[in-house]
Amino acid sequence: PTHPLATAPVGMPAHSVDGFVREFLHELNTNQGVALSRSSANDQYLALASTVRNYLMARWLETSRRTREAKAKTIGYLSAEYLLGRQLGNALLATDLNEIAEKGLALCGLDLVTLRNQEVEPGLGNGGLGRLAACFIDSLATMDVPCIGYGIRYEYGIFRQTFVDGRQVEETDTWLALGSPWEFPHPEASVQVDFGGHTERYVDADGEERTRWVPSWNVLGVPYNYMVPGYLNGRVNTLRLWSAQATKAFDLQIFNAGDYAQAVRAQTFAENISKVLYPEDSTPQGKELRLQQQYFFVACSLRDFIDNELEEGFDLHNLADRITYQLNDTHPVIAVPELMRLLIDVRGFSWDEAWEVTSKCFNYTCHTLLPEALEVWSTELLGRLLPRHLEIVYRINDQFLAEVDKTFPGDGLRTRRMSIISEYPERGVRMAYLATVAAGKVNGVAALHSQLLRDKVLPDFSELWPDKFTNVTNGVTPRRFVKLANPKLSDLITDAIGPGWLTNLERLKELEPYADDPEFKASFAAVKASNKQRLTALLKTRDDIDLPDGHLLDVMVKRLHEYKRQSLKLLHIVSLYEQVLSGKLPASALTPRTVVFGAKAAPGYRMAKDTIHLINKVAMKVNSAPEVEGRLKVAFPANYNVTLAEKLIPAADLSEQISLAGMEASGTGNMKFALNGALTIGTDDGANVEIRQLVGDKHFFLFGMDEPAVTELGAKGYHPGAYYESNPQLRATLDLILSGHFSDGDPHAFDSVVFNLLHQDRFMALADFQSYVDTQALVEQRYADQDAWTRSAILNVARTGYFSSDRSMRDYLQRIWHTSPML
Ligand code: 26V
């Protein structure tokens, strides 16, 4: 190019109110094609988003130029889910444009908050795992680490939850319907992904025996780029999500055959692959479409980096110097045989050369301990969809089992236990084993979880390769979950300890002395009260829920799962209510308390849906009972999501983290609550263990069995009925539910939930009931002393800076990725 502008860095709108207004009106007029006076709120939101985008654009292009030039090592984060939450607020924060935007919009007669509320959040994840991915890419950008997040652009994200007569009803999440100003499609950079067919042997020109895959169908992966801005540091990384489309060849073939309708159906078939996020997050159902999704995005992502990000002629033997792939659970593990295939079949590597490279490129994070959540793909399905990959997996397994046999000669039982291929109930590929064999490092997500992973899930592997296993405790981004969600607390913190803590969260420690400063305590309590008012206003308009004033706000928000034990929280509520109803307790003895639930159930998870129904029915009854009026209230706003979390968490007094010990890998909500000054009532599980260690026993309400006690009880035989028989209050509580009191007299309405508790109770809610109820009484005692409560709340904030996802990223960089920020 000869024009001077063609090679100059792209311009940026002026960082001033005037520059902002100019850019905004330009976007409104030229992009939306409307005059301000005729524009809708959606027009205004879209123009505002484009405006902020334009401020990031120069930095984005510059980041990508710098990274290429430096040939820096990139983190390829492979995740089937990214639960991003709204983008606009974060982009304004990252560019320091919030005040400017507010003033500029006011000059146009518009309100920034109103426009921010137009945004529909991209809910491209189920819960903790997807939200963690979003926090991690935020931290990497903020820490100036090159990272490309790879995933799927689901046309429909996690379903929208509504309640009809207290039962969950799912609606589709049409997050793209009103336009999506944050994405940049690049159809010209599409990648072809093959499926099906068979393999053949042939001899190549050099006389080498080789394999070729002859696939039977294919689709196109279209990349959509999203900006991932670092906080005030000028770095903008990329999130690249793939959307599936029919290939032209595929269409043409059918069109030429004259079957127009069939060709259109073929398009639909292809587009199905990225159509919808699977809403199950515990039991893999071996669904073919899910495997298609996994291979689809992984194949696109590997090809993308190798073909587009590396310079021409790059020697792939050195691939590990330029990228390290992090496998977010087993969902992207098919990447392992895919890289082998690319290197061997396409690039002509020998098996050993290919394995040498592949085994240096991947690391694996496990996010669960539940045996039923570990993915196993039947070889029948894998062989049909990806025949070449199945062959490669078999060979990886042969080579691996030979190594096992060398280390433990003649230990046939052990080799069978460790085989990547399982034989029962059908022959299948254990994806967690494949990941562990291929990965340089395997990590759990909290100290306890990593220990249990070594001891219980993968003990043979940790014996074989003790150094392969490590822990990285999860974290959350303080930009979204403190600064954006809790601006008042953030200002208070900055007033006390000065700026800079948002990127160095351990500095919150400097708040400790303020826990005994009466003035600071009063301000802190005022912030909490104001956050409660903000929540009250929101729930009124969003859900027509009335939150009473002056209540202890007791919050349990997370996916609905039996192991998380929403039913235990419910038993506590019913127990309090029953005691007042039966005259065992005067209502005046209850600490005024509002319990807020937020939870989606997987659409096919019966027990979870029945539990939601029961919570709603209990809420209806309790909320209208004069006996407990003003003392006990249950609120269950539908459709808990990131946007609601940002308002709920800063208002909470009490954080419920009550999973059965040994079941919650980490939890990340627990960290968000503590950082926003809620006290935790929790079991010795996941990251609760580390939260308690850091904040101190006095400022954390521990209850229930620990993991060894759970294991012991399970081993000696657990009989929930015995607790019902021996504990009168527990019995009265369950009997009240069984009486039909909450179900208009129908005594069988909740049989599934109650009988499950009485006769099975896999997660031992009844065993922990008394301890839970007793500990809730301690909570009430502490709450009665508002001064002591506030002190504990401040210490929770001051002592949980460790849980910044910046720290998690530092740990990954040091222990797993062996790379450092670009400076
Ligand atoms: C699992 C599965 C199982 C197969 C079917 C599809 C599917 C989709 C998602 C998942 C995710 C389950 C694992 C998960 O979300 N774990 C959560 O990860 C959080 C981040 O590490 C952690 O804080 C939670 O404790 C853990 O439950």
Image: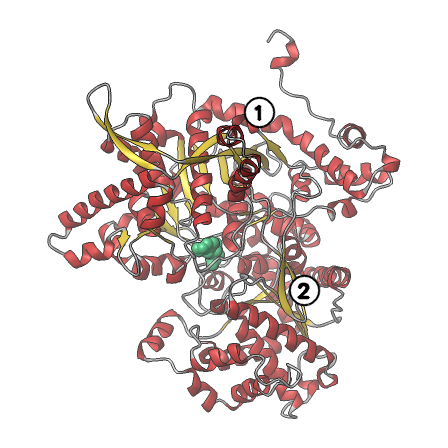
User: Residue type at mark 1?
Assistant: Glu
Residue 729 as seen in the image, left or right of residue 762? right
Nearer the observer: mark 2 or 1; the answer is 2
Q: What percent of the width, then of the height, locates residue 698?
A: 52, 70
Q: Residue furthest top?
A: 2
Contact between marks 2 and 1 (CB within 8 A): the answer is no
Q: Which residue is mark 2?
A: 637
Tag 2: amino acid: Pro
For this orientation, the residue located farthest to the right is 37
Image quarter (top left, top right, bottom left or bottom right) of the N terminus: top right
Tell me the SS state at disc 1. helix
Q: Which mark is residue 62?
A: 1
Residue 477 % position (x, y):
56, 48
Q: CA distance from mark 2 to mark 1?
A: 43 Å
Front-most of residues 281 and 815 = 281
The residue at 66%/57% (across/down) is: 644
